[in-house]
């Protein structure tokens, strides 16, 4: 009992509210100057009356919904902007790739067209060159051969290589009976085997005196058909040679071209001279640099010089 009394004595006692104070709390107004009544009201009115008003709860929920709605709208706008930016980036990438592909295709077409045009130009140039050469060959045939003995062409023996002399005694005896062909053999037509001038060695030269001052346009070199010879070999035919025009007064040698005589393809070939600017010559020199393999002599069957006459000689 003593303990219960002590606990009751320590427990705070609530103030006793008079009967009139509840009435005040329920609806009566307390004068502004009556501070004691206001204090009693605050102490004696129920706890639910001191909390928030019933209208404050719904207002806070509406504000929260408005905040969420605005946040959702902002998020939707950001997502829409991101989606639009993504579409724009995809469009930019597509346009860039399309431009790169277009440039690559255009470049390929340009190089293909350039190669084709270059090839056509080269083909046309080659065709024009061949046509020009063909016309020059035709013109060469239309001009007379001035290196003929029958019209006065001669051999300058002083500036011509020596004739080959046979080394074996049997060949020497044969040469006494059948003389070796002289250099002017090349100034006469003839295509029989052995009807040639055997020049000493695989290198040498022959100088042809023309019957008039000639503007040479081409030289024709002839050899016998290898199939008609006993050995059936063109080893004694000239291979690489050069042609020079000799001036009458100064004895100047003017190069007119270097050529290769492929007797295996044709045993008669035309060689167009490079006489630019055109000059007239009284003598033509044919310099043989090599033959097709014969170590002792080189056989020349015929040399023709075609061109236009400038001034005839007076006898």
Image (tube, helix red, strand yellow):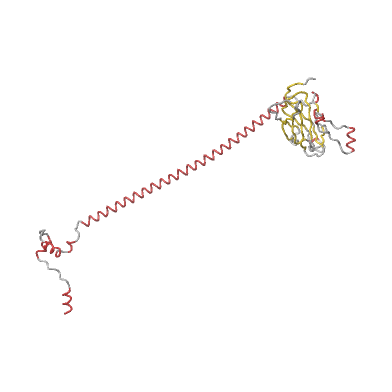
* Res. 195 image quadrant: top right
* Res. 139 image quadrant: top right
Q: Quadrant of the C terminus?
A: top right
Residue 148: horizontal and vertical position, in percent?
Answer: 79, 26
- Judged from this view, the residue extending furthest toward the left is 20
* Res. 256 image quadrant: top right
Q: In front here: 289 or 176?
A: 289
Residue 281: horizontal and vertical position, in percent?
Answer: 74, 26
Vertical relation: 199 (above or below) 211: below
Q: Quadrant of the N terminus?
A: bottom left
- Judged from this view, the residue extending furthest toward the bottom is 1
- Judged from this view, the residue extending furthest toward the top is 314
Residue 164: horizontal and vertical position, in percent?
Answer: 84, 35
In the picture provided, is 21 more to the left or to the right than 72? left
In the picture provided, is 153 more to the left or to the right than 109? right
Vertical relation: 75 (above or below) 265: below
Q: In front here: 216 or 247?
A: 247
Residue 114: horizontal and vertical position, in percent?
Answer: 57, 37
Number of numbered discs overlaid on the protein picture: 0
């Amino acid at each position: 009992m003593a303990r219960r009394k002590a606990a009751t004595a320590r427990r705070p006692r609530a103030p006793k509210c008079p009967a009139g104070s509840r009435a005040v709390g329920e609806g009566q107004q307390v004068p502004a100057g009556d501070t004691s009544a206001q204090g009693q009201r605050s102490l004696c009115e129920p706890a639910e009356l001191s909390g928030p008003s019933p209208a404050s709860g719904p207002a806070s929920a509406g504000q929260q919904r408005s905040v969420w709605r605005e946040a959702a709208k902002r998020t939707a706008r950001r997502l829409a902007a991101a989606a639009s930016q993504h579409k724009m980036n995809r469009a930019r990438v597509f346009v860039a790739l399309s431009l790169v592909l277009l440039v690559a295709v255009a470049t390929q077409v340009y190089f293909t067209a350039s190669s084709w045009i270059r090839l056509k130009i080269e083909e046309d140039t080659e065709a024009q060159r061949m046509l020009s050469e063909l016309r020059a060959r035709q013109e060469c045939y239309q001009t007379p051969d001035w290196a003929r003995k029958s019209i006065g062409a001669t051999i300058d023996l002083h500036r011509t290589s020596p004739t080959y002399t046979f080394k074996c005694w049997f060949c020497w005896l044969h040469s006494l009976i059948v003389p070796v062909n002289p250099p002017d053999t090349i100034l006469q037509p003839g295509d029989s085997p052995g009807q040639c001038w055997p020049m000493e060695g695989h290198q040498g030269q022959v100088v042809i005196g023309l019957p008039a001052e000639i503007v040479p346009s081409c030289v024709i070199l002839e050899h016998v058909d290898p199939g008609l010879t006993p050995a059936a070999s063109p080893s004694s035919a000239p291979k690489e040679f050069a042609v020079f025009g000799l001036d009458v007064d100064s004895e100047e040698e003017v190069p007119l071209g270097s050529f290769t005589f492929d007797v295996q393809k044709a045993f008669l070939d035309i060689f167009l001279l490079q006489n630019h600017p055109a000059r007239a010559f009284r003598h033509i020199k044919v310099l043989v640099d090599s033959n097709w393999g014969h170590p002792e002599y080189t056989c020349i069957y015929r040399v023709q010089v075609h061109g236009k006459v400038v001034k005839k000689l007076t006898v």
